[in-house]
Amino acid sequence: MNTDLIQSELLDGILTVRINRPEKKNALTTVMYGALADALLRAEEEPGIRVVLLCGSSDCFTSGNDIADFINFPPTGSDSPVLRFLNAITNATKPLVAAVSGAAIGVGTTLLLHCDLVYAADTAQFQMPFVSLGLCPEAGSSLLLPQLMGHQRASELLLLGEPFSAVRAEQLGIVTAVLPQADILQAVRARAEQLAAQPAAAVRLTKALLKRGDAEKLRETALYEIECFLERLASPEAREALQAFMERRKPDFTQFD
Ligand code: COA
C-alpha cells in the first residue's frame, strides 16, 4: 500500500520516509500507517537500503493518530495497519534516523523510542496525551520510558500529558541532539549519510545487541498495552475526550469515576 500522504525516496542507500499531510498536522490515518509499515518492510527486504530517515513537514512531525479515525475506524486485529506499523518499527533491523520538526504528539513521540538516532529542531514540541484522552501508553512506551528516565519523570509525562520542549526531550534521553530548525533536514541527512557509509553488517549487529536485552519483555508489554488501549478506546472517558477534540471544546470527565 502506498499513498502521497507517505512519501518514500531512495537515494544513496538512504530511504527517506516523509509524513505528508500538513493540513491535518500529519495526523496518521489507517492508510498512512499501512504505507509506513510497507516502507519499513521494504527497507528490511532491499539490500541497497542501509538507513531509513523518517521525517514530517517543517512545522509538524506528526500530531499522532488521526482522532476521527480513532472514533470511526478503531484498530481491530493484529493485522490492522497501526499494529503492522508498530511491529515493523519495533522489529526493524536496519538503523532508523528521525528528524523531528514541530509537534510530535502521541505515537509521534513513542515511535521515536524505537529509532536509533533522533534529532529534533529547537522548535520541536513533544507530548504524550494518552491519559488526557482517556487512553493509555502504547508502542512499548510504558516499559521504555521509565527505563530511559525513571518512573517519576515518565509518570509526569504520561499522567499529566503536557507538551515538552526539544531541550527537555534531549535531557530525558528521547532525543539524541537538538539542532537549529533552519537546517535540520540537511544536518540529519548528513548524519544518515555518515551512518550509511559505516559497514552495514556491523551496524545491524550493534543495533541488535543494543536492543537484545529487552526484546522479549518489549514484545510482551506492547501486546498487553494494545489490549488495554483497545479497551480504553471504547471507554466512556475516551469517547468524551475524542468527541471534545472534534467539537473543539474542553472534555468533561466529572461524570466518570
Ligand atoms: N487527528 C485528527 N485531526 C487532527 C489531529 C489529529 N491527531 N491533529 C490536528 N488535526 C487537525 C485539526 O482538527 C485541524 O483540522 P481542521 O483544519 O479541519 O479544523 C487541523 O488538523 C489543524 O489543527 P489545529 O488544531 O487547528 O492546529 P494547531 O496548530 O492549533 O494545533 C496541534 C496543532 C497538533 C497541537 C493540535 O492539532 C493537537 O493537539 N492535535 C491533537 C493531538 C492529539 O491529541 N493526538 C492524538 C494523540 S494519541
Image: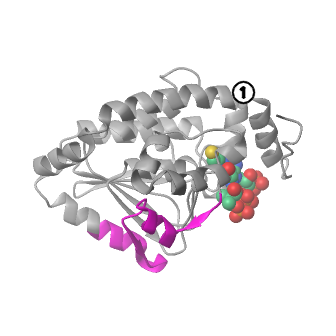
Q: Residue at x 53, y 68 (%)?
A: 58
- In the structure shown, which secondary structural element does the residue marked by tag 1 occupy? loop
Check disc 1: other Cα within 10 Å, few if <14, some if 14-19, many if 20+.
Answer: some
Q: Position of residue 115 (x, y in %)?
A: 36, 51
Examine the image and state in which quarter residue 39 appears: top left
Q: Position of residue 124 (x, y in %)?
A: 54, 68
Is 210 placed left or right of 80 in the picture? left
Q: Residue at x 48, y 22 (%)?
A: 78
Q: How is the image coloured?
A: one colour
Examine the image and state in which quarter residue 127 appears: bottom right
Residue 243's place in the image compared with 113, above or below, is above
Q: Position of residue 177 (x, y in %)?
A: 38, 70
Residue 173 lies in the magenta stretch: yes
Task: Tell me which amino acid carries mark 1.
Answer: Ala
Quick check: can you spot residue 117? yes
Q: Nearer the viewer, residue 198 or 228?
A: 228
Residue 153's place in the image compared with 49, above or below, is below
Count of marks overlaid on the render: 1
Residue 184 lies in the magenta stretch: yes
Q: Nearer the viewer, residue 225 or 87?
A: 225
| Label 1 within 8 A of ligand 1 by Cβ | no
Quick check: can you spot residue 21? no
**Residue that carries the numbered disc 1 in the rendered image:** 234
Is 39 placed left or right of 196 in the picture? right
Q: Residue at x 38, y 30 (%)?
A: 219
Q: Residue at x 42, y 46 (%)?
A: 144
Give the residues drawn in magenta, as a range.
162-190
Q: Position of residue 141 (x, y in %)?
A: 48, 44
Q: Nearer the viewer, residue 81 or 140?
A: 140
